Each structure stands twice: as structure tokens, then as C-alpha cells.
Image: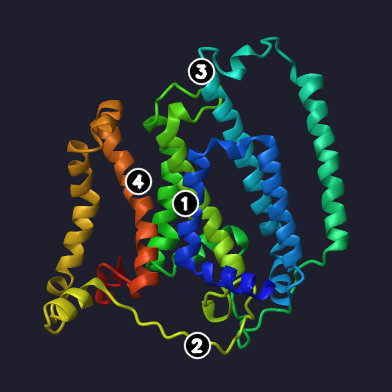
Amino acid sequence: MMGVVKGFINWISAPYYFVSLSILLIWAMLRWKGWVKPKVFTAIFLAFAAFYIISTADPNFRLIVVKADNIPIAGMLFLVIFFMWLALKQAFENDERIAAGQGPVEATESKDKLLCWPHLVYTEFICLILLTVILLAWSIIIQAPIEQPANLTDSPNPSKAPWYFLGLQEMLVYYDPWIAGVLLPSYIIVGLMAMPYIDRNPKGNGYYTFKERKWEISLFLFGFVVLWVMLIILGTFLRGPNWNFFGPYEYWDIHRVEPLVNIHLSDIIWVKLLHFGLPKNMWVREMFGIVTVVVYLFVLPMVFARTWAKKFVEKLGMVRYLIFMNLLLMMMSLPIKMYLRWAFNFKYIVNLPEIFFNI
């Protein structure tokens, strides 16, 4: 029975299922409010923790999750689940109160001010002492993940970045280095800086709510949980030797070879659809990809502005709407490229190796 369960989990851990299920899970968490009830969440959380602990009996699973580098990632997973529950629980409760005309819980709390000294400083000091004790115990019990000195002739396989860069390392599979390592991280930073200026909705200031900020919270959870946390988990636990995908109970076979052929948009159109050879002129060869990128980044926002995104134009104004759509489309390009890569071995929309420019 346990073998069947392990086989099913290994099968469903394939990246296309893994990411799809994470998207469906976020959608279900926002739609079904019953899971935030303390008893329901406690049962779900304890069942997940028990399953995780039981899974450590499997040698392949244990080899990955108890590795000193990976223990904080497992802890991060539990913390993300807990704080998502805490925030959405308060948001759903406030939505019910607002619908009943009672106002959010935060508005009914005492308005008496508390001084930083001694109230806040005492609390922070106690937290500092507790965390110091935890870190000392951690450093004594768990061996530091220090490996042998670097050797150019003997690179580790798989060779992974630190956990906080694993999302970027995963993006290198789908994008050229200048996009995955420079452009997209810059977009993340610029987008976070621009967010307060784009979103001027005063609702939700000072209190938790979901109903009054559905789009904002949904997009944030998709970007943070699916496109960042899940990529870190995927890179930590499911990427094995030769950067192949392995299930959590699979043996990391260093000799396993998976054939992978890079297919570009120009190959699909010129060779497979039109049955021609690739043109020698690089601009003619890649004109379909260039047109696709231009339509995606510049034409789609204008089309959406006249159709389903009219309310966003009215709410934000045209300038802020265009900035918002540009950031949104850049974010959505990642899952699009991921699914194309997994399903069709699709690599680049625009492939210009002559000038080292690929999209």
C-alpha cells in the first residue's frame, strides 16, 4: 500500500502536475473559507506534518529532507502554510463582519496607545533571547553543511545555488541568463517599489480583508507562493543529478539520462508548419518570434483595455494601467515558458545566437 502511495506521489510530483496543483490549491484556499476554521486547519496541518514525519522512514526521502542545507526549506514550507492561514483567517472574518455592517475587528480594538518602551522593547528582547537559544541548539545538534575545498575538476552533481537563489537558478532553464539573472530580478524589485504607486485602493489599509482586494491578494499569492516558494521547493527537493526531475521517494540516479531537444519558435513555424528550411537571414528567421513578443507586450495590453480590463483602466488610469499590465505580462511569461518547456521542449521565442540575444 505504501509503495502505491509513494509511486503516486512521485508521479504527481512531475513539474507540470506540481505547479498546476499548487495553482489549484491557492485557488481553492481563496474560494473555500471552511479550511481556515481552527479545528479544520489544525487537523489538516497535523495530518500534513504526520505524513512528512512518516515519509522520513523512506531512505531516499530522508536523504534529501534531513540534509543540513534543506532543513530550513522544510521549515519554511510549514511557516508559509501557517502564516497564510493566519492572514486569510483574519481576512475572511473581517469580510463577514463588514458584510454584516459591523466593521473590521481592528476598528473595534482599543485605541489606547502603547509606548515602545517598555512594551515593545521587552517583547523584542524576549524574542531575541529565544531565537538565540534556538540558533545555538541548532548549531550544536546539526552539523554545518561544509564540504571539501572547491575543486575545478570535481564539481558537485547537482550543483545548486543557495536556497534563496534556487528560484533564479530554476528560471535559467527557461530563459537566457540575461533575462533570468538580470531582467526578471530587476522587474521584481521595480514592481515591488512601484506597487504602492500603482495600487491606491484605500480599502484594506490597517485591517485584513480579501473581498475588498481580491485581485491584489490573488496576484500576490500567485507570484509569491507559486512563482517563488514553489520554485525554491522544486529546485531543492525535486531537482537531482544532471538537473533532472526526481520524485521525493526516487533514488537520485546520477547515470539517468533524459534526452532533451531544444525547439525554438522558428523551428516550429518554418520547419514543421511551412516545411521550409530555416532562412539564413537571422531577422527573417526570427520575425515570427519578434512579432509574437511585440504583440504580447504592447498589443495585448491595449486589447485588454478595451475588453475585460476596462475596470482596471477606469480604476488606475491609462498610465498606471500600462505599467501594471507590463509587470503582469512579464510575470505571466514565466509559467507560460515553463509549461511550453515541459510539454514541447520549447526553448526560445526569439533565438538570435549571432548577437547573443534570446528570449
Q: Quadrant of residue 337?
A: bottom left
SS type, badge 1: helix
Work out whether residue 32 can be spotted: yes
- Between circles 4 and 2, the one closer to the viewer is 2
- Between circles 1 and 4, the one closer to the viewer is 1
Identity, as a three-letter code, of the amino acid under mark 4: Leu
Q: Which residue in the protein does label 2 denote?
A: 257
Query: Residue most toward the front?
Result: 1
Identity, as a three-letter code, of the amino acid under mark 2: Val
Which numbered disc flags the more N-terminal residue, 3 or 2? 3
Image position of 336 (left or right of 18): left
Which numbered tag is attached to residue 24? 1
Q: Quadrant of residue 118?
A: top right
- How far across and down, in percent of the image, does residue 88 sit? 57, 35
Frontmost residue, 257 versus 288:
257
Q: Which residue in the protein does label 4 denote?
A: 328
Give the CA distance from mark 1 to mark 2.
31 Å
Residue 328 lies, with reference to residue 275, above or below; the image says above
Q: Quadrant of the N terminus?
A: bottom right
Identity, as a three-letter code, of the amino acid under mark 1: Leu
- How far across and down, in percent of the image, does residue 182 sit? 42, 58
- How far across and down, in percent of the image, does residue 309 sit? 25, 36
Identity, as a three-letter code, of the amino acid under mark 3: Ile
Seen at 66% across and 75% down, the residue is 3
